[in-house]
Image (spheres, helix red, strand yellow):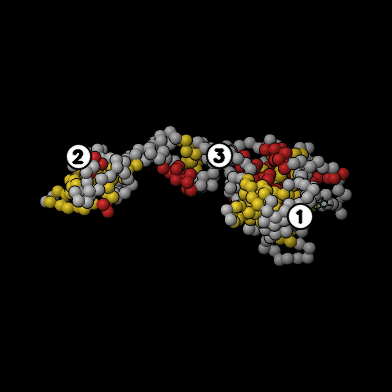
Amino acid sequence: MQSQASEDRFRRRALQPEEALKAILGHVKPLVSETVGLLESWGRRLAEPLAAPHPFPPFRRSGMDGYAVIAADLAEASSASPVTLEVLEELPGGVAPRRAIRSGQASRIMTGGMVPEGADAVVMLEMTATSGAGDRSFVTIGKSVAAGLNLADIGSEIAEGAALIQPGCAIGPGESALLAACGSACVAVAKRPRVAVLSTGSELLEVEEALAPAKIRNSNAPMLAALLREAGALPELLGKVPDDKGEAESLIRESMERCDLVVTTGGVSVGDYDIMADLVAESGQLLFNKVAMRPGSPTSAALIGGKPLIALSGNPSACFVGFHLFVRPALLAMQSARSCLPGSFQAFISVPYPKTNAYRRYLRGYTELRDGRVWVTPTGKDQSSLMTTIAGADCLIEIPAAKHGVEAGQLLTAWRLGRGE
Ligand SMILES: Nc1nc2c(c(=O)[nH]1)N[C@H]1C(S)=C(S)[C@@H](COP(=O)(O)OP(=O)(O)OC[C@H]3O[C@@H](n4cnc5c(N)ncnc54)[C@H](O)[C@@H]3O)O[C@H]1N2
Ligand code: MOO
Ligand SMILES: [Mg+2]
């Protein structure tokens, strides 16, 4: 038998979730940067601002397949009285013009081609008729056009020196395009936080093991590995330990030497075998061991060797919520993200939640747009032991602490899950 739960385990002061997060963030520093190839930078956080090294487009660019002309030449053109211009040269994409356009002249140009000096508009092919005489070529146009038509000026999209991406911004498809257009073959990004994951519990089986009486498979570790990857971190799965404080502590201390953060699951409540509760209490640097929230009220954190240990509840839904409220923000702060919290929005809850709530609740939910309004619906029962409510959740629905529940149709705050900030 394990010894009786120490008195400390029962003496807990609940912090508000914001206070608990602040306690963790106070011990988190941005990680140094590293340089990676552009194609490896997807999902990483930019370490340096990107300013445009040159204007874009870098030359006057045609937006259509057609003829580069001087608009004034066509001022009187009409179908009854078309204007014929001499064609100087052909300008496919990638070919710099050799000849400037003078009055009475045009050059055949393709979309993306460089517009020659003198020309100030491009007339699309469909509005033209081409003819030839000997080795000369002509184009006839029966319509006037405005100067600037189908022509993108130098720097019309991006001025030289324009601030394009802020440091801390996640590199997605649009950022990749900007980096490429600016010639950033190598990109300075924040290092990926290395995070050790330790599962505690004598009831845990490996995923590939057959069920045995009183045992369940370790489902929190793969869930956390997925969440960590989504948050830009490198998970290091330490596996599971039985409810043995000494074993857990030596693994945690050892992994703190090479990791930026350790996350554990299970053993944070007041039970006889809740080893993590004792471990954080005895760490000498307890940050908190209770949070005024459900699920996950026994979520705890301490410093081990100066680095944060976040001890999440073993109950799957509490583990999931605790990750989003405490672990993910810490990882984003390490990667210098501008905002560490999930993005919040206001939405109507589609069903009542009648329970009274001493603590704020975070229900796993999904979002829908109906009749021009945003609605959120819980994915299932609000029980911290359930994991079926995690799959399909795209938000956390915040139910305020109050002596009454909420009614269907009430406007509430919800938090976006996944990559949304
Ligand atoms: N007397 C009290 N009992 C409990 C209290 C309390 O205040 N007084 N709090 C309850 C609340 S709230 C929560 S949340 C849980 C916290 O549990 P622990 O963090 O101590 O976790 P365990 O006891 O180790 O396990 C709880 C539950 O989760 C399952 N589990 C654990 N690890 C995993 C894993 N890796 N994968 C899947 N499932 C896991 C475990 O088998 C248990 O069923 O305590 C309440 N009790
Ligand atoms: O604080 Mo717990 O996660 O509700 O069962
Ligand atoms: Mg327990």
The residue at the point 34 percent across, 42 percent down is 152
Label 2 – label 1 distance at C-alpha? 79 Å
> In the image, what residue occupies the spot 76% across and 46% down?
401
Circle 2 residues within 10 Å: few <14, some 14–19, many ≥20: some
**238 vs 168, nearest the viewer:** 168
Say if mark 2 contacts mark 3, CB within 8 Å. no
Q: How many marks?
A: 3
Where's residue 367, x and y in %?
Answer: 62, 54
- Cα separation between marks 3 and 1: 41 Å
Q: Which residue is mark 3?
A: 168
Tag of residue 177: none
| Label 3 with label 1: CB-CB less than 8 Å | no
Let me know if residue 302 appears in the view: no
Nearer the camera: disc 3 or disc 1: 1
Of labels 2 and 3, earlier in sequence is 2
In this figure, which residue is indicated by the disc labeled 1? 354
Q: CA distance from mark 2 to mark 3?
A: 52 Å
Instruction: State which tag comes first along the sequence, 2 or 1.
Output: 2
The amino acid pointed to by label 2 is: Ser
At which x and y percent is residue 287?
Answer: 75, 39
Task: Give SS at disc 3.
Answer: loop
In the figure, is residue 202 to the left or right of 229? right
Q: Residue 153 placed where, x, y %?
A: 34, 39
Question: Who comes first in sequence, dot 3 or dot 1?
Answer: 3
User: Is label 2 in a helix, a strand or a loop?
Assistant: loop
Name, please, the residue furthest toward the top: 161
Mark carried by residue 103: 2
Amino acid type at circle 1 is: Pro
Q: Residue at x 12, y 51 (%)?
A: 133
| Quarter that holds the C terminus | top right
Secondary structure under badge 1?
loop
For badge 3, the amino acid type reads Gly
